[in-house]
């Protein structure tokens, strides 16, 4: 077989497999050309020189022809695939299990919707918070007993943290977002801050990670009446109950003064809790007038600006609204559970 014939076989190979067979037959370990090159060992020096040159030239030619053919075959294969694999967009897809947003997300979005209707914007803050924003700026100085109450997760500041003295924590509440907002925005302020919070606590009614929605209003002439009106309107909208009984019970938070806890009326039986009238009360949030120390820390003059704040647990409210008895099921990722509660 002469060179032209060999090249002809290469260019006529009709697929990659055939081409590879040709390559092996010519250039493989026992291929025709490889053998011929090996055979040069027995030739005379003169022959070796001329024949060797010829064979090596042929080898290069064949290799080039193979590479060229390979490229052409690959391109043709690709084009064939493209033509073949048409997607029929009118074809119905396989029946798929439809996912849904987590109930916590849904409830937070519902809360956002209600507050948006009352003119509130949404703000967020970091989950790994510094000591200053989580405690100090909220009128909770280092030795304050409230720090123990919070069962804080402390975070090692690591090597590359900017300030060695800064202690980092997983935020124990969403209240640091109050501080961040007051320090970065001009009043009037009317915001809510939904998000995850963390406390080193785990039992039937506590998970180490949970969610809160914080609220903050700063304006001129704000008083307790505004707080009560706003919170009541929210709760009645959330539970869809115009006549939901609500009471404000005096309480204490370092960052509000006066402070209150908000209870809603319910009827408790052994199996469940029914929201509405019934003579029992259930605590659903903390609130109060922003403490003058907090305002001052945020460079706001308490004689000029006043405000109120509130904070509520999202899981607690979701459990009440949807009659979910066990907090921990929220974080078990069981699709059957989602279905059961209709989410
Ligand atoms: N941050 C408080 C808590 O987690 C709740 C709260 C928020 C109370 C705002 C008053 C004002 O318990």
Image: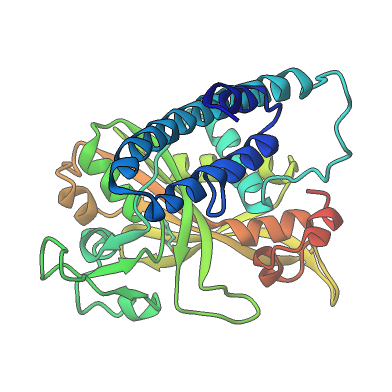
> In terms of image quarters, where does ligand 1 lie?
bottom left
Query: How many tags in the picture?
Result: 0
Q: In this view, does 219 lie to the left or right of 37?
A: left
Q: Where is residue 205 in the image (x, y as percent from the top left)?
A: 63, 75
Q: Which of 248 and 130 is in front in this view?
A: 130
**Where is residue 325, by image quadrant?**
bottom right
Q: Nearer the viewer, residue 156 or 104?
A: 156
In this rendering, does residue 88 appear at all? yes
Residue 191 vertical position relative to residue 342 in the rendered view, above or below: above
Q: In this view, does 133 lie to the left or right of 194?
A: left
In this rendering, does residue 233 appear at all? no
The residue positioned 16% from the left and 49% from the top of the image is 296
Q: Position of residue 25 (x, y in %)?
A: 61, 44
Q: Nearer the viewer, residue 200 or 306?
A: 200
The residue positioned 43% from the left and 47% from the top of the image is 37
The residue positioned 39% from the left and 68% from the top of the image is 252
- In this picture the colour scheme is rainbow
Q: Position of residue 190 (x, y in %)?
A: 39, 35
In the rendered image, the quadrant that contains the N terminus is top right
Q: Nearer the viewer, residue 309 or 150?
A: 150
Q: In this view, does 322 lie to the left or right of 52?
A: right
Q: In this view, does 321 lie to the left or right of 114?
A: right
Residue 225 vertical position relative to residue 333 in the rendered view, above or below: above
Q: Position of residue 280 (x, y in %)?
A: 73, 67
């Amino acid at each position: 077989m002469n060179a032209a014939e060999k090249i002809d076989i290469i260019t006529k190979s009709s697929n990659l497999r055939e081409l590879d067979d040709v390559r092996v037959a010519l250039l493989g370990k026992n291929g025709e050309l490889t053998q011929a090159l090996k055979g040069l060992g027995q030739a005379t020096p003169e022959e070796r020189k001329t024949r060797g040159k010829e064979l090596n030239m042929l080898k290069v030619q064949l290799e080039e022809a193979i590479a060229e053919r390979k490229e052409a075959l690959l391109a043709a294969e690709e084009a064939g695939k493209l033509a073949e694999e048409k997607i029929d967009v009118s074809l119905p897809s396989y029946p798929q299990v439809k996912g849904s947003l987590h109930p916590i997300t849904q409830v937070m979005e519902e809360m956002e919707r209600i507050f948006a209707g009352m003119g509130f914007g949404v703000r967020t803050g970091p989950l790994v918070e510094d000591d200053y924003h989580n405690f100090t700026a909220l009128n909770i100085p280092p030795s304050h007993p409230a720090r123990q109450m919070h069962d804080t997760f402390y975070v090692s500041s690591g090597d590359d943290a900017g300030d060695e003295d800064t202690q980092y924590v997983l935020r124990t509440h969403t209240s640091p977002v109050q501080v961040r907002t007051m320090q970065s925005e001009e009043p009037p302020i009317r915001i809510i801050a939904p998000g995850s919070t963390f406390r080193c606590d785990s039992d039937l009614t506590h998970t180490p990670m949970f969610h809160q929605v914080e609220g903050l209003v700063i304006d001129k002439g704000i008083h307790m009446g505004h707080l009560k009106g706003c919170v009541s309107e929210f709760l009645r909208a959330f539970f869809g109950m115009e006549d939901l009984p609500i009471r404000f019970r005096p309480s204490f938070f370092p960052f509000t003064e006066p402070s209150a806890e908000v209870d809603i009326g319910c009827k408790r039986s052994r199996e469940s809790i029914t929201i509405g009238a019934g003579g029992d009360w259930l605590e659903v949030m903390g609130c109060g007038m922003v403490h003058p120390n907090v305002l001052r820390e945020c460079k706001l003059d308490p004689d000029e600006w006043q405000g109120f704040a509130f904070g509520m647990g999202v899981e607690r409210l979701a459990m009440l609204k949807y009659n979910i008895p066990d907090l921990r099921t929220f974080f078990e990722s069981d699709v059957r559970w989602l279905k059961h509660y209709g989410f």
